[in-house]
């Protein structure tokens, strides 16, 4: 083997250093996604990972073991750094991931350009099911300082960057769902006593005027419902519906056939278990939306609203993919429910349609999950991208 080839081989096996930058725009999606990616690069790809986040308190909400005031801390093998406006000189990593087009510090970009061996610079984009994503995934963009930046698009087809999914996720989830004692034990751990025979639903969403129509429908349904609501933005609407009194974690209210349990905001991996436990999950944004798909259970997505209704194209693009393989009545039921929920229309009709098709939609959710899980996951796709780029 020539000296050059040997050096190349050694650099390929040496642990790759990653810098992931996260600017918390609002909510928990930006940090939720970048934190998951950081953990997975460490756990499954032997990466040396620094996660730079400009709002450590948002990080501490999804990772309660974290110290919201620490400048630097190691959590699950990831060095989590507070990203201050006043940037201190730092050697750039081998791979630099800017989460969702956040702006890297100028001094850091200059240090990247000055490095003898230039880092791979990637912009990790938001998840979208739109068809144009595949055409843009992996495209380079020449920067004024001579560096290339590549666009890395997560997505639902094999010609995109894929979806974040840990290697053991689906097996763990299926084992949890197959063990009859796992769900009640998990719920009791959260301080919730399961209601026998009730349909278990989790609710994580933005403020939504459609909520009252759903709660009313649940309260009068033949089958009982137990609704689990982690503290968050939708809670004010739940509160208004139960009569205006303030609700807190641990509270429980019963209205007809509906029991509402308010949960604390829980650690991210616990939230996964909550999704696995439920028969139906209402989710939002990007990360919970994806985790609900990995739960293999039917769901309802509250998409993050964008200017000029851009989010509605994203919603339709996902729906177009998701309904593939459903019968006409089941797909009609799903489309009506998701569209009503996302346009603040009453869901009383669409929910009853959905219930008529519940069985098919439940089988379909697992099928969709397994089909998506057959694609390369996003962290592995990033690592492959880096190896091909060297
Ligand atoms: O919080 P979000 O609304 O985030 C949004 C979206 O990402 C949106 O696309 C983005 O533009 C905007 O932020 C800035 O929803 P999302 O993406 O589901 O993120 C929530 C995270 O919180 C997710 O990682 C799961 C986690 N979570 C917990 O850890 N514990 C909990 O109890 C709950 C309810 C959620």
Image: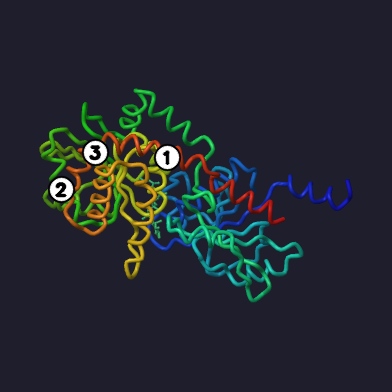
Relative to residue 112, is residue 331 drawn left or right? left
Mark 3 residue element: loop
Which mark is drawn over residue 357? 3
State the residue lying farthest toward the bottom: 144
The residue shown at (40%, 54%) is: 28
On the rendered structure, is 170 left or right of 305?
A: right
Residue linked to disc 1: 369
Mark 3, mark 1: which one is toward the viewer?
A: 3
Q: Earlier in the sequence, mark 2 or mark 3?
A: 2
> 200 or 330, which lies in front?
330
Q: Nearer the viewer, residue 301 or 52?
A: 301
Which residue is farthest front? 328
Q: Dot 2 corresponds to which residue? A: 348
The mark tally for this picture is 3
Instruction: In the rendered view, tell whether residue 22 sits above or below residue 76.
Output: below
Sequence-first disc among 2 and 1:
2
């Amino acid at each position: 083997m020539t000296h050059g080839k040997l050096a190349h081989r050694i650099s390929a096996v040496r642990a790759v250093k990653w810098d992931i930058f996260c600017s918390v725009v609002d909510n928990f999606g930006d940090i939720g996604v970048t934190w998951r990616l950081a953990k997975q690069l460490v756990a499954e790809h032997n990466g040396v990972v620094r996660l730079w986040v400009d709002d450590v308190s948002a990080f501490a909400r999804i990772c309660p073991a974290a110290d919201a005031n620490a400048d630097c801390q190691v959590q699950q093998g990831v060095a989590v750094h507070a990203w201050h406006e006043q940037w201190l000189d730092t050697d750039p990593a081998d791979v630099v991931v800017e989460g969702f087009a956040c702006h890297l510090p100028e001094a850091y970009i200059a240090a990247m350009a000055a490095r003898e061996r230039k880092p791979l610079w990637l912009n990790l984009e938001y998840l979208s099911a739109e068809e144009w994503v595949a055409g843009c995934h992996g495209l380079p963009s020449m920067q004024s300082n001579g560096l290339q930046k590549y666009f890395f698009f997560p997505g639902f087809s094999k010609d995109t960057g894929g979806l974040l999914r840990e290697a053991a996720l689906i097996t763990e989830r299926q084992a949890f769902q197959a063990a009859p004692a796992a769900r009640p034990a998990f719920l009791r751990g959260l301080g919730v006593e399961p209601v026998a025979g009730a349909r278990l639903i989790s609710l994580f969403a933005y403020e939504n005027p459609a909520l009252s129509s759903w709660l009313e429908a649940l309260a009068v349904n033949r089958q009982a419902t137990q609704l689990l609501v982690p503290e968050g933005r939708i809670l004010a609407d739940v509160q208004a519906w139960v009569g205006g009194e303030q609700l807190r974690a641990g509270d429980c209210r019963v209205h007809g056939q509906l029991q509402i349990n308010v949960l604390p905001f829980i650690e991210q991996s616990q939230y996964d278990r909550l999704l696995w436990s439920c028969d139906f999950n209402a989710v939002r944004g990007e990360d919970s939306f994806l985790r609900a798909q990995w739960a293999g259970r039917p769901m309802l997505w509250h998409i993050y609203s964008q200017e000029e209704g851009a989010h509605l194209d994203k919603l339709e693009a996902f729906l177009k993919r998701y309904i593939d393989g459903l019968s006409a009545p089941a797909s009609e039921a799903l489309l009506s429910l998701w569209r009503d929920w996302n346009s603040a229309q009453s869901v009383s009709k669409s929910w009853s349609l959905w219930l008529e098709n519940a069985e098919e939609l439940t089988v379909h959710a697992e099928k969709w999950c397994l089909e998506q899980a057959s694609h390369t996951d996003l962290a592995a796709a990033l690592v492959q991208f880096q190896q091909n780029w060297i």
